């Protein structure tokens, strides 16, 4: 080697035994030579390394004596430090020699000599060098001797200095940067605890109690050091931890927060529960921080409490209530769900949600209910946190189901999370602020783990769908239909673009007009698309840039995304290409990204549906899960009704389902499918559909089969195939259940094949009349009961409503006659829960053995009333129904049953939309249809006296949107201000409706005035008038035309009373006059003079067109009504105008700043409203045509809806000890207000009971 002499010396010393006297005396010269500077600082590192080896061996030979002075030993240790640094690279050539030096130094314990040096710096260098050289590559070899060297020095020291303590404790801060050094520090803490403990305790107490660091550089890291020391040697901190209570109570919120974080981390360590018991004072002060005045401290203590509870579960605690510490923390955590600070509430939701996700069944039901309650929080950030936590919990459980064979997913956990999809869909229905962004993404893309296969995802969606309620299914339907709407609008935009390009290429004036029209239509399509985005205003600004894009590849990719039936790979490629070409810096990138995501990704795409179909076709043998197959079939039909485009490329699979799987499911899909460009149905498929159309057990399958035949074979082919089946139905020899199916078949024939229906219209009408005439008495002796009779009645009414309103083509005379016959039959009491005939008929037909008296007002009768009202609403689309029938149907808005009111409101909305608008973009129909539509618009004012606040808001919102849509269409078409097409004309229909309202006072009460309690009897009508006028308000005031129409009504009479005697005509005119006076006064109160001045004064004609079948000239001698009470003619003191938001204002719009006086005025109004709410009792419920004698039988007690009506929003169980103010704080009130219980105009049950909910 390069140093043969040094190597021989090292070999001799290595073989020499310790204490050899001969060699010891002979090594004197060698020892002097080894400490020469030229050797210690030799430029050859091999020489220096061998010198270090020889010095270490020489020290071992002389031990326990030292052959060198202190100054010489400092030079020797300097060489050793240089050698120790070579330990950092195990692959180096010097590593083995350096390791030999370390092992020899450890064996000799020579480092203890440093304690006698005059300076502490060499000792500090020793600790720095050795702890710095250990790393993951050498820790297995170096750690033991290195730790022993340092521990030996510490054990020999009397008391380590602060500087040495800094070096030792500094290793505990290297957990992330240098884990081996961190492990060395932990070992030193244990091995030298007797020496380090007093110094550590003194230093920490000085920092905590006195705020003095004693010159330490680790003052800012002492919390981390406490945590690490507690994890390694908790006994060291026995006198230190109690002093943390001082920091928990400091005035500085930053220090309190840091102390809270430290204590929380300590409690989350193994043995944290024991610590809580051992340091009770500290734990009590920690719990007090849940009520800290600083929100950041409260958020920090929530996080710490969550970690503690999670750790307790991981360490074997099954129930948090089993331990006093965890029970107190858990209770305090739940209390913060009602904190006044939204950030604290959101943090509490996240912590509680994390616990729920980790162990769903471990979270008590009461806590889960409180978590659900936060989904109605008034702050969007809190609701968003609820959504995120619930999605994470559900996705985590699904992932656990598929991990390790499902061993980690317990049945109790499944029961604890199965409600989450339905709850999120319920939030989607109610939370407009989070609907288009957060909730849509949560349900459609985040609910299931992405790593699941297509088959697994489809199976989970089958399970999810099967557990949803009807409102939740409606929300899911809306979500699934949204991509179809976007795709249709996008295809329309691309088609108009092609038209514009073609017109531009042709040139000429006519082509320029065509191009301008196409460009305008493109803009409208983009605006309609933007309304489906989370932020419509911002999306519209971005999408308008598409009009300036020249790259045809962008539109090619958009066309691929909008084409139905594309494979997943094609959609993904189109999405990636589109976003790449647009560029991430463009404003258009975000809008097209959302659009592409909605069209290319979904919970149920083409491959999911084909997977379900394959399962239904291939698993039909014995042992198949029939319940799952039925649920899968329902899901397929459901998806087809929402977005039939998903099946566009799956026609062969659907045909296999029709022929070899579940025909009824396939028929539901085929009934929605567009057959243009598709191959015709095979013969076996046609026969399967005919068999379904003739079914006697599945009414829905009959309907779908007829529609599928009409779509697949055309009107002529379907008529030829269906005629024999229809002949058998009309023959009238079917049982009730088969008859219900036959009626649905005939109803769908009238809807899809109106020409064929004309042949069977008379027979169909005879059957429907017979069913309605017999009513609930039908099948009395056959044991069918009221429920079976109700099913047949509902089937007949639904069939009639479909048969008489065809989807395409004109209405035939046969259908018109059927509509007239049905309208006449419905006047026999089907629309009226108080009908004397219905009550007597029911009492005579129901035996006491079959049903209890309480069953007379149960669900079947509610269903029959709803079916009758819905039938009238649909028939009104194509037929002018009698006024009496219309008004009785309209009273379903105030039905005793909440479900009837809610469902009929939707029916009324759809009917009004159908009568008002046609085409795309929507344009108003003619005057006749619009005049009929005004009646349906006026119906929404009846919702004002609904006992459910949510129904009031929904009715007002629907009416307001409808009025604004009609007004916008009128402006677009240039309709004049006094035209009957204007929405203000609905006031005439409202006045006539109110005059025929069963609760409107009689002539005697109107003549007597205050003496007859007129104020109380008209209070509900005042509220309904206010609701109607606010629905029609425009630009902050009541339009002038509305006020003039009301004044004109004072001179009109009731045209429906012309056939009666003169006194009755005068009485009817008096009612109209009183209502007109009431409406005029209220309109004047609601009008804003300043807004009136700002608006352009349009010329008002002297005469208006009025509905002649409702109004006529008032007869001579019409009595003058008594003076109306002043409280009726003006707004109450606590009245607050409805908040009307502009549809053009985006969600991101900045709210208008209010001045302090305005704030004070509004606060005073709210305070007055709370202090003295209006308590009005509505007039007694009375049916038209009844005398005072009959009124005692038919009158109803006021409906008490405080329990049943608000059960879905106010029934959340709360802990008993929680103060009421804290429980209800920051939760939007959704329960009925005291003034909302005015149920006089809400119909009540026949025996004075509260309506069945």
Image (cartoon, rainbow, N blue to C red):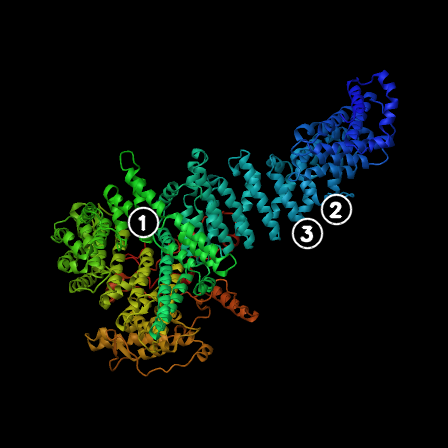
Q: Secondary structure at mark 1?
A: loop
Give the Cα distance between marks 3 and 1. 66 Å
Q: 10 Å neighbourhood of mark 2: few (<14), some, or many (≥20)?
A: few
The residue under the point 55% across, 37% down is: 312
Say if 491 sits above or below 214 in the image.
below
Label 3 vs label 1, nearer the camera: 1
Q: Is residue 858 visible?
A: no
Q: Is residue 280 visible?
A: yes
Q: Which mark is residue 211?
A: 2
- Please identify the residue farthest to the front as the structure is shown: 2
Residue 591 lies, in percent from the top left, at: 46, 59
Q: 10 Å neighbourhood of mark 1: few (<14), some, or many (≥20)?
A: some
Give the Cα distance between marks 2 and 3. 13 Å
Residue 652 lies, in percent from the top left, at: 28, 46
Which of the marked residues, 2 or 3, is nearer the chain's N terminus?
2
Q: Secondary structure at mark 3?
A: loop
Left or right: 32 with respect to 1187? Answer: right
Q: Secondary structure at mark 2?
A: loop
The residue under the point 57% across, 69% down is: 1156
Q: Which mark is residue 649?
A: 1
Task: Tell which of 1250 and 377 is nearer to you.
Answer: 377
Name the residue carrying label 3: 252
Residue 283 lies, in percent from the top left, at: 63, 41
Task: Tell which of 672 and 74 is nearer to you.
Answer: 74
Left or right: 1093 with respect to 307? Answer: left
């Amino acid at each position: 080697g390069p140093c043969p002499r040094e190597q021989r010396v090292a070999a001799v010393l290595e073989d020499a035994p310790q204490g050899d006297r001969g060699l010891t005396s002979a090594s004197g010269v060698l020892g002097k030579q080894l400490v020469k500077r030229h050797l210690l600082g030799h430029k050859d590192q091999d020489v220096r390394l061998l010198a270090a080896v020889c010095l270490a061996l020489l020290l071992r030979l002389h031990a326990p004596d030292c052959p060198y002075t202190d100054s010489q030993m400092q030079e020797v240790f300097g060489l050793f430090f240089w050698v120790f640094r070579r330990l950092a690279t195990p692959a180096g050539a010097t590593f083995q020699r350096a390791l030999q030096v370390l092992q020899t130094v450890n064996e000799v314990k020579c480092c203890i000599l440093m304690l006698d040096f005059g300076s502490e710096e060499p000792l500090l260098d020793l600790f720095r060098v050795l702890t710095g050289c250990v790393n993951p590559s050498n820790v297995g070899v170096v750690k033991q001797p290195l730790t022993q060297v340092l521990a030996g020095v510490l054990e020999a020291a009397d008391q380590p200095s602060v500087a040495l303590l800094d070096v030792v404790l500094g290793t505990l801060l290297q957990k992330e940067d240098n884990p081996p050094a961190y492990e060395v520090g932990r070992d030193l803490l244990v091995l030298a605890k007797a020496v380090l403990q007093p110094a550590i305790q003194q230093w920490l107490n000085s920092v905590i109690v006195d705020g003095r660091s004693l010159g330490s550089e680790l003052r800012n890291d002492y919390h981390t050091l406490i945590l690490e020391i507690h994890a390694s040697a908790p006994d060291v901190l026995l006198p230190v931890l109690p002093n943390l209570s001082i920091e928990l109570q400091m005035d500085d919120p930053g220090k309190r927060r840091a102390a809270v974080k430290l204590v929380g981390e300590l409690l989350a360590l193994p043995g944290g529960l024991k610590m809580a018991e051992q340091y009770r004072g500290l734990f009590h002060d920690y719990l007090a921080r849940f009520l800290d005045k600083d929100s950041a401290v409260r958020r920090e203590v929530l996080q710490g409490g969550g970690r503690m509870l999670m750790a307790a579960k991981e360490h074997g605690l099954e129930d948090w209530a089993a331990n006093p510490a965890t029970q107190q923390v858990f209770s305090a955590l739940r209390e913060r769900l009602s904190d006044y600070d939204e950030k604290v509430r959101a943090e509490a939701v996240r912590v509680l949600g994390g616990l729920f996700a980790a162990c769903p069944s471990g979270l008590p039901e009461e806590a889960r209910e409180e978590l659900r309650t936060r989904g109605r929080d008034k702050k969007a950030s809190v609701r968003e946190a609820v959504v995120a936590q619930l999605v994470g919990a559900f996705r985590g459980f699904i992932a656990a189901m598929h991990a390790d064979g499902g061993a980690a997913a317990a049945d109790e956990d499944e029961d604890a999370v199965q409600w989450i999809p339905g709850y999120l869909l319920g939030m989607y229905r109610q939370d407009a602020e989070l609907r288009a962004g957060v909730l849509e993404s949560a349900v459609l893309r985040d609910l299931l783990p992405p790593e699941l296969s297509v088959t697994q995802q489809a199976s989970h969606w089958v399970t999810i769908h099967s557990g949803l309620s009807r409102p939740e299914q409606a929300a899911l339907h809306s979500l699934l239909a949204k991509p179809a709407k976007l795709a249709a609008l996008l295809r329309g935009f691309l088609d108009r673009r092609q038209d514009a390009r073609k017109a531009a290429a042709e040139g000429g004036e006519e082509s320029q007009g065509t191009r301008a029209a196409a460009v305008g239509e493109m803009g409208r399509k983009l605006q309609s698309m933007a309304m489906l985005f989370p932020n419509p205003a911002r999306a519209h600004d971005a999408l308008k840039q598409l009009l300036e894009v020249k790259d045809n590849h962008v539109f090619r990719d958009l066309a691929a995304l909008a084409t139905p039936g594309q494979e997943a790979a094609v959609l993904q490629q189109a999405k990636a290409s589109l976003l790449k070409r647009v560029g991430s810096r463009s404003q258009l990138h975000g809008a097209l990204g959302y659009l592409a995501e909605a069209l290319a990704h979904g919970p149920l795409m083409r491959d999911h549906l084909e997977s379900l179909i394959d399962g239904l076709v291939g698993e039909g043998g014995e042992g198949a899960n029939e319940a799952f197959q039925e649920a899968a079939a329902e899901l397929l039909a459901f998806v087809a009704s929402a977005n039939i485009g998903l099946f566009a490329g799956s026609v062969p699979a659907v045909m296999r389902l029709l022929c070899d799987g579940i025909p009824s499911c396939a028929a539901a899909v085929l009934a929605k499918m567009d057959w243009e460009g598709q191959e015709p149905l095979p013969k076996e498929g046609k026969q399967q559909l005919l068999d379904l159309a003739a079914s006697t057990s599945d009414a829905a399958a009959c309907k779908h089969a007829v529609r599928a035949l009409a779509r697949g074979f055309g009107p002529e082919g379907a008529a030829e195939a269906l005629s024999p089946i229809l002949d058998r139905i009309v023959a009238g020899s079917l049982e009730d259940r088969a008859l219900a199916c036959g009626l649905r078949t005939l109803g769908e024939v009238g809807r899809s094949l109106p020409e064929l229906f004309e042949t069977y219209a008379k027979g169909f009408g005879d059957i429907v009349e017979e069913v309605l005439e017999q009513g609930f008495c039908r099948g009395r002796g056959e044991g069918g009961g009221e429920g079976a009779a109700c099913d047949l009645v509902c089937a007949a009414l639904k069939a009639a409503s479909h048969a008489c309103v065809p989807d395409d083509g004109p209405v035939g005379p046969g259908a018109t006659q059927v509509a007239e016959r049905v309208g006449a039959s419905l006047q026999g009491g089907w629309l009226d829960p108080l009908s004397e005939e219905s009550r007597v008929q029911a009492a005579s037909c129901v035996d006491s053995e079959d049903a209890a008296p309480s069953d007379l007002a149960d669900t079947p009768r509610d269903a029959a009333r709803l079916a009758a009202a819905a039938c009238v609403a649909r028939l009104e689309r194509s037929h002018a129904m009698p006024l009496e029938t219309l008004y009785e149907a309209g009273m379903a808005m105030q039905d005793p049953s909440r479900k009837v009111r809610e469902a009929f409101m939707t029916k009324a909305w759809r009917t009004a939309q159908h009568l008002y608008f046609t085409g795309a973009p929507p344009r108003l129909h003619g005057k006749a249809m619009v005049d009929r539509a005004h009646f349906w618009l006026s119906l929404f004012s009846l919702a004002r006296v609904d006992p459910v606040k949510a129904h009031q808001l929904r009715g007002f919102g629907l009416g307001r949107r409808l009025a604004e849509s009609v007004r916008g269409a009128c402006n677009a078409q240039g309709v004049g201000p006094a035209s009957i097409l204007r929405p203000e004309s609905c006031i005439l229909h409202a006045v006539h409706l109110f005059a025929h309202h069963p609760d409107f006072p009689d002539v005697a009460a109107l003549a007597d005035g205050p003496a007859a309690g007129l104020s109380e009897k008209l209070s509900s009508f005042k509220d309904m008038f206010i609701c109607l006028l606010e629905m029609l308000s425009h630009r902050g005031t009541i339009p002038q035309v509305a006020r003039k129409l009301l004044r004109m009504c004072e001179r009109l009479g009731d045209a429906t009373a012309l056939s009666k005697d003169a006194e009755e005509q005068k009485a009817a005119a008096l009612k109209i006059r009183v209502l007109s006076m009431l409406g005029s006064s209220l309109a004047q109160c609601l009008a804003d003079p300043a807004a009136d001045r700002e608006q352009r004064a349009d010329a008002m004609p002297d005469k208006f067109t009025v509905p002649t079948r409702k109004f006529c000239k008032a007869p001579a001698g019409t009595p003058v009504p008594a003076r109306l009470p002043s409280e009726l003619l003006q707004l109450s003191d606590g009245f607050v105008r409805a908040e009307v938001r502009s549809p053009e204002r985006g969600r991101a719009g900045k709210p208008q700043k209010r001045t302090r006086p305005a704030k004070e005025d509004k606060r005073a109004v709210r305070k007055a409203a709370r202090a003295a709410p209006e308590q009005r009792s509505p007039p007694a419920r009375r049916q038209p045509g009844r005398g005072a004698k009959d009124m005692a039988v038919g009158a109803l007690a006021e409906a008490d809806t405080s329990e049943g009506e608000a059960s879905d929003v106010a029934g959340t169980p709360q802990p008993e000890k929680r103060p009421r103010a804290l429980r209800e704080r920051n939760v939007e009130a959704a329960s009925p207000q005291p003034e909302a219980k005015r149920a006089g105009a809400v119909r009540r049950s026949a025996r004075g009971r509260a309506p069945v909910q």
